Structure formats: C-alpha cells, structure tokens
Image (cartoon, grey):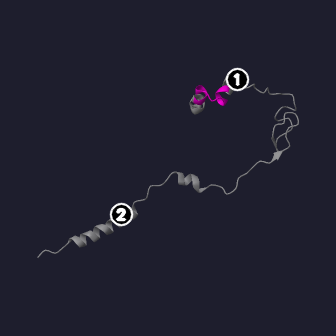
Amino acid sequence: MFRDQGSDNDTIEDDEETSMSSAIPREVDPLDFVYTNIPDTTHILKLDANCKHCKAKKFVSETDGFCCRNGQIELKQPEPIPELMRLWSSMDADSRHFRENIRFFNG
C-alpha cells in the first residue's frame, strides 16, 4: 500500500547537495593573489670597488664622493658600552635574563 520513498528522496537530496556544493564558490585564500606573480629572477646591483677614503662598499652607479664626499666627512666609530658588552657576553643571572628577553628590552 505504501511505497518506500526513502530511497528516491535520498538520491534527490544527494543530487541536490552535489549540485549545491558545486554552485557555492570555495573560500578564496587572499594570499593566493600575492604568491601567484612571484618573479623567477631577481635584479641585483653590481658592486664597484670600495671607496678609497672610507672603504664603504659601492655600487656601479654611485659616484666617487657619494659616501664620504671624497674623505671630507668622517664618521666616528662608537665605542662599545661596557655594561652592554657585559650583559651580552657574561654568564651571570642578569646577563642570561637580558639575552632571554632581548626583544622586550629592544622594544
């Protein structure tokens, strides 16, 4: 008297779910756009001879006086701060704490 309609409905629902899932676009990863156009090669500037006055590294397109104005400008080399050198090189508790939390101190 009653017909088993469960199997017919199941196949219709399965077909609807399949067609529905293909109609819904998958979530797009925003980083896909960033990583799709990565170049195969890089451009690297060619180095030239170091400055004869200050020994700075130079690139081919830089002029002779670009770094130190042909020796007119002399940068002072800073002396290392003794307390910082001790914190960096010692093995006492203060030094270990400093090195373990260096990002905090730099902030």
| Image quadrant where one finds the C terminus | top right
Q: Which mark is residue 20?
A: 2
Q: Residue at x 66, y 55 (%)?
A: 39
Residue 90 among magenta residues: yes
Q: Nearer the viewer, mark 2 or mark 1?
A: 1
Checking the image for residue 51, the label placed there is none
> Is disc 1 surrounded by few (<14), some (14 to 19) or many (20+) residues within 10 Å?
few
Q: Position of residue 49 (x, y in %)?
A: 86, 43
Q: Do callouts 2 and 1 mark residues in contact (Cβ within 8 Å)?
A: no
Distance from the alpha carbon under mark 2 to that under mark 1: 70 Å
Residue 62 in picture, x, y percent from top left: 82, 41
Which is nearer the eye, 26 or 83?
A: 83
Label drawn at residue 82: 1
State the image quarter where residue 92 is shown: top right
**Residue type, label 1:** Pro
Compare residues 54 and 21 and report the one nearer the observer: 54
**Residue type indicated by callout 2:** Met
